[in-house]
Amino acid sequence: MTDRSTFPDPVYRDTVLGPLFDGVKAHYADHMAAINRAHLVMLVETGILTAGQGAAIAGALSGIAAETDLASLTYTGEYEDYFFFVEAELKRRLGADLGGMLHTARSRNDMDHTVFKLALRSRTDAMLHAMLILAEALIAKARAERDTLIVAYTHGQPAQPSTFGHYLAAVIEVLLSDIDRLERAGRALDLCPMGAAAITTSGFPIDRGRVADLLGFAGAKRNAYGCIASVDYITGLYSALKLPFLHLGRVVQDMAFWSAFEVGQLYVPNALVQISSIMPQKRNPVPIEHLRHLASVTVGRCDTMMATMHNTPFTDMNDSEGEVQAAGYDAFASGARVIALLTAFIPACSINADRVRKTADAACITVTELADTLVREEGLSFRQAHDIAARTARAVIAEQAPLRRGYSAFCTAFQTEIGRATRLDPDVFATAVSSETFIARRDRFGGPAPAALDAAFDDYARHADALSAALTKTRTRQTVAANALAKAFGQLTEIT
């Protein structure tokens, strides 16, 4: 019969405490060690512990780090969790009194949220870096494809001509906005909870700012209750992380549509297609499907984090800790795969100019410019010009002829609508309905004409450079902090 009189109950051990212990091994052990070192340095610097006490504890911490084979540790239930395992080792090496002094003026509460922020900070940094690499790849591809004609679709139907560069520029704008949002959300990770202790700080003269500095944070999070109870650093982060994958998923769906045999606008190179095992003629661009489902999985994992926080109490609670945090890391993992694959996929693809031209001809997608030309050259209202353009389009589509060969149909439509002959000669008509003219005349801010796009590309590049510089500045601060912590802790160990 199972003995349930002693903690931990075997089922609780196996279903909760064991997995949590494994989670610490996988994600947090190094961060916990850094917190121990930083907290010890602060305790000595503030005089809460003597230099001799600090030196003894520092030596024991170094010994634990050097002599513990983390990978081989298994959870036995002897200690409640990894924190108590380290504390037990300190007491074994230093005695119960001195071994327990490291925990002065702190709690597992502030340690936990600091550990989680450190783990999320590194993942967010890596995600921002990957997204910026994608942005730079898209900017380069958009510049190269500035003049490459495409058919732009609305409601699943051919609409107007544009360029691949113009399409990618729209993708870049959204991506840069998503990077901005994620970077802003990540700022909540840059405020350190250490010193909040259980929830109200401490009666000891601690220096919260010093610990924050040593751990590479921008500063200490002010309100101690909020350090423990508020989980906005989780909800804000995963809300921001969700959006790029929702948005990029829409682009991936376009890639699926454009590469379909019936559309054929996008050519996916052989390195990114798989051939059917039974139908040798089929070129299956399966990376698109993997991109689509991985993006959706990432969105779902972010939603899981948001839903888990819903209706939880505004206090310390396990709903925001341990396994919940580890579940969120899967969103970063699947998201990173999307970003890496897209960074390779889009630059490798090309536009099938022949299919673009055929679709443009078949669907009369330049006819809007014919209407605009009639307004400018013939002095018509746009509604009159629109009706003439519509009559012309219906006639050439019925004849399965390209619009550029529809001058006769246009003349008939104009005479019928206006009651006189048009002043547009065949050359002016042909120029008005060409895709190149359509693009060139849309040289307004945000348009697809070359000058407008070049200005946009330069702006996107400046934006990306500024984001990259900010990321580099943060990384440099964290490196300086790590070096400062190593030096301060090292000085403790040298005290005799």
Image (cartoon, rainbow, N blue to C red):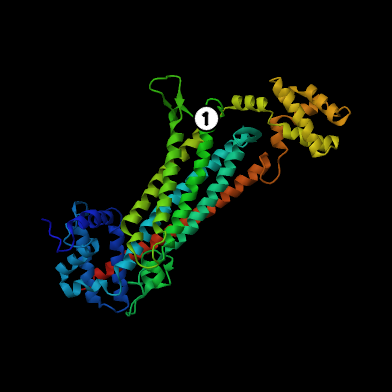
Q: Residue at x 44, y 34 (%)?
A: 287
Looking at the rendering, which quadrant does residue 81 occupy? Answer: bottom left
Residue at 29% x, 62% y: name it: 32
Is the N terminus in the top left, top right, bottom left or bottom right quadrant? Answer: bottom left
SS type, badge 1: helix
- Residue 462: image location, x then y, percent: 57, 51
- Residue at the outermost right position: 420
In this figure, which residue is indicated by the disc labeled 1?
A: 259
Residue positioned most to the left: 1
- Percent of width and height locating residue 288: 46, 35
Marks counted in the figure total: 1
| Residue shown at the point (51%, 33%) measured from the top left | 256
**Amino acid under disc 1:** Ser
Q: Position of 136 compared to 49: left or right?
A: right
Left or right for 153, reference 478? right
Percent of width and height locating residue 111: 32, 66
